[in-house]
């Protein structure tokens, strides 16, 4: 029994070399598009399970808790089964399966590609294409956005998702291996699909939304600190403003976590972001994030600097993650 537990822990444990491979693949290739993508499967399972729970009358907080328990358990069991089968075949296949799962659950490369796609459309004065691409990243109204507004929304989405699309997955992989990153992605998917403050989801989505807040809490603040540190050494950025604006304005935006990286990015770039946001024809906010003395983000150069900042910050955190895993491995051995 003890040997089986040790073997299982070995299958699921974080691996520094595989993390390097996964991060490199993510930045070079973007998110892999295939029908059996783990996030797609979790989304489909969530929709099916939600329907069964609601049919059984579990449509409040208890139903949301059961939804999380079911999705997390099934997802981890499937991962364990696939890794065990791969391990039985060969050590190489085990590494391949583990690495491919890890690569599939990181999203910085794909975010950068979306931002560049939007920027290309704006630069070519094809606003309908820019708005269509942007609508795949944000839920707000995009039909009336001009070029600068598209750029600001793209940078805002990039800075927000730097945390929950890349830093948090790395954090939970280092902490708890594949089960950690898989459970985080289950929670993140729940938050995006049912974590709404609407009559239908206020109770049912409570579990996913609160767990998402908890699991992003530390990574969000780490991201703020790293953005400030990176901005302090890159030319034409401001580490001091990244620190100060992140500290003072992170609470301006909804939620306890997203504002840290967004406000830090605005400070680092020395530009104001966010601005007027419309949902279904209603103005929900016109708050600007950033130093009041700085101009709004508007130009292609601003977008390029935002991409450089996000990728540099993500790479710094990835390197730190690899170092932590390497130090842990050398201590154990």
Image (spheres, helix red, strand yellow):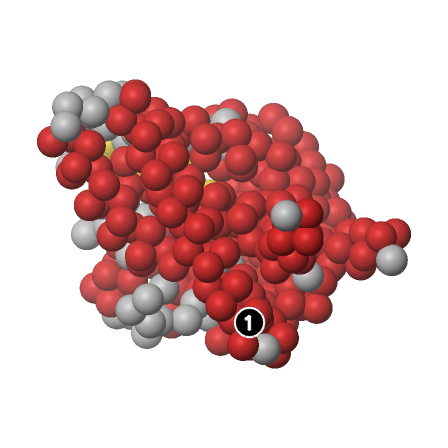
Locate residue 151 relative to residue 170 in the image: left or right: left
Q: Residue furthest front?
A: 1
Q: Residues within 10 Å of mark 1 (few under 14, many from 20)?
A: few
Measured as percent of width and height from the top left, residue 112 is found at 48, 64
Residue 222 seen in this snapshot: yes
Residue found 54% across the figure and 48% down from its top? 179
Q: For the C terminus, give its image quadrant.
A: bottom right
Q: Count the marks: how many?
A: 1
Locate residue 224 relative to residue 121 in the image: left or right: right
Residue found 55% across the figure and 71% down from its top? 88
Measured as percent of width and height from the top left, residue 208 is found at 38, 32
Res 217 quadrant in image: top right
Measured as percent of width and height from the top left, residue 199 is found at 18, 22
Instruction: Compare residues 29 and 313 and report the one nearer the observer.
Output: 29
Instruction: Compare residues 222 and 64 and report the one nearer the observer.
Output: 64
Locate residue 227 relative to residue 159 in the image: left or right: right
Residue found 31% across the figure and 57% down from its top? 41
Locate residue 195 relative to residue 102 in the image: left or right: left
Residue found 34% across the figure and 39% down from its top? 70
**In the depicted structure, whether residue 236 falls above or below residue 286:** below
Secondary structure of the residue carrying tag 1 is: helix
Q: Residue furthest left?
A: 55
Residue 227 seen in this snapshot: no
Measured as percent of width and height from the top left, residue 147 is found at 33, 58
Q: Mark 1 = which residue?
A: 88
């Amino acid at each position: 029994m003890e040997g089986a537990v040790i073997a299982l822990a070995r299958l699921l444990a974080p691996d520094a070399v595989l993390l390097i491979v996964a991060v490199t693949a993510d930045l070079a290739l973007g998110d892999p598009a295939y029908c059996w993508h783990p996030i797609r499967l979790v989304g489909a399972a969530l929709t099916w399970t939600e329907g069964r729970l609601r049919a059984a009358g579990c449509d409040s907080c208890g139903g949301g808790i059961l939804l999380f328990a079911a999705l997390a358990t099934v997802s981890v069991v499937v991962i364990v089964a696939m890794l065990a089968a791969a391990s039985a075949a060969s050590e190489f296949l085990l590494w391949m399966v583990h690495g491919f799962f890890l690569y599939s659950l990181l999203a910085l490369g794909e975010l950068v590609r979306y931002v560049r796609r939007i920027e290309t459309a704006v630069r070519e004065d094809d606003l309908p294409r820019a708005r269509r691409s942007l609508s795949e990243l944000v839920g707000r109204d995009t039909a009336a956005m001009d070029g600068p507004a598209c750029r600001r929304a793209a940078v805002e989405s990039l800075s927000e998702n730097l945390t929950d699309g890349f830093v948090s997955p790395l954090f939970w992989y280092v902490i708890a291996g594949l089960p950690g990153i898989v459970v985080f992605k289950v929670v993140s998917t729940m938050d995006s699909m049912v974590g709404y403050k609407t009559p239908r989801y206020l109770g049912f989505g409570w579990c996913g939304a609160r767990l998402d807040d908890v699991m992003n809490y530390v990574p969000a603040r780490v991201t703020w600190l790293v953005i400030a540190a990176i901005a302090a050494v890159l030319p034409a950025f401001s580490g001091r403003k990244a620190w100060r604006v992140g500290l003072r304005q992170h609470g301006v935006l909804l939620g306890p976590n997203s504002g840290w990286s967004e406000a830090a990015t605005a400070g680092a770039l020395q530009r104001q972001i966010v601005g007027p946001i419309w949902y279904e024809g209603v103005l929900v906010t016109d708050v600007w994030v950033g130093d009041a003395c700085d101009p709004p983000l508007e130009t292609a150069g601003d977008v390029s600097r935002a991409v450089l900042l996000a990728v540099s910050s993500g790479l710094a955190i990835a390197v730190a993650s690899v170092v932590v895993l390497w130090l842990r491995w050398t201590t154990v051995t």
